[in-house]
Image (cartoon, rainbow, N blue to C red):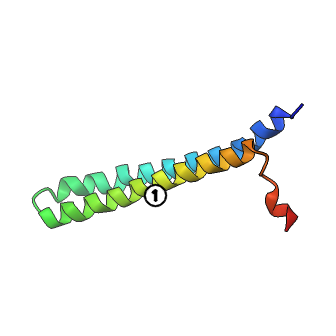
């Protein structure tokens, strides 16, 4: 019978790292970019640049979530220690 508590503890680290990075990026958007959007309301080029910048950060967050999903699938499949073979 597989040890589920060991797999649960191995899942905690990737989830924690993903949550910390997503929180950092969300705070970055909220603190830095949203006030700048308010300041540059009349300038279309500046607003466009900031929106593209926000979309890049959202894409990074999506990449983090995809990597987290893949890592959790690896842990479920028992592949967490494959790198030790090499």
Question: Left or right: where does residue 2 sit relative to residue 27?
Answer: right
Residue 2, position as x, y percentages in the image: 86, 34
Residue 61, position as x, y percentages in the image: 47, 52
> Which residue is rendered at x = 74% and y = 46% of the image?
75
> Which residue is rendered at x = 82% and y = 33% of the image?
5
In the picture of the structure, the residue carrying the numbered disc 1 is 60
> Which residue is rendered at x = 85% and y = 68% of the image?
86
Residue farthest to the top? 1
> Which residue is rendered at x = 36% and y = 49% of the image?
30
Residue 72, position as x, y percentages in the image: 67, 45
Question: Left or right: where does residue 7 sit relative to residue 67?
Answer: right
Quarter of the N terminus within the rendering: top right
- In the rendered view, would you say 29 is above or below 43? above
- In the rendered view, would you say 52 is above or below 80? below
Q: Which residue occupies the foreground of this view, 74 or 54?
A: 74
Q: Which residue occupies the foreground of this view, 76 or 44?
A: 76
């Amino acid at each position: 019978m597989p040890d589920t508590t060991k797999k649960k503890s191995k899942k905690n680290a990737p989830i924690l790292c993903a949550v910390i990075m997503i929180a950092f990026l969300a705070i970055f958007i909220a603190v830095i970019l949203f006030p700048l959007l308010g300041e540059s309301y009349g300038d279309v080029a500046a607003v466009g640049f900031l929106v593209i910048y926000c979309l890049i950060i959202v894409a990074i967050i999506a990449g983090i979530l995809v990597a987290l999903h893949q890592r959790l699938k690896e842990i479920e499949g028992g592949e967490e220690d494959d790198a030790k073979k090499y």
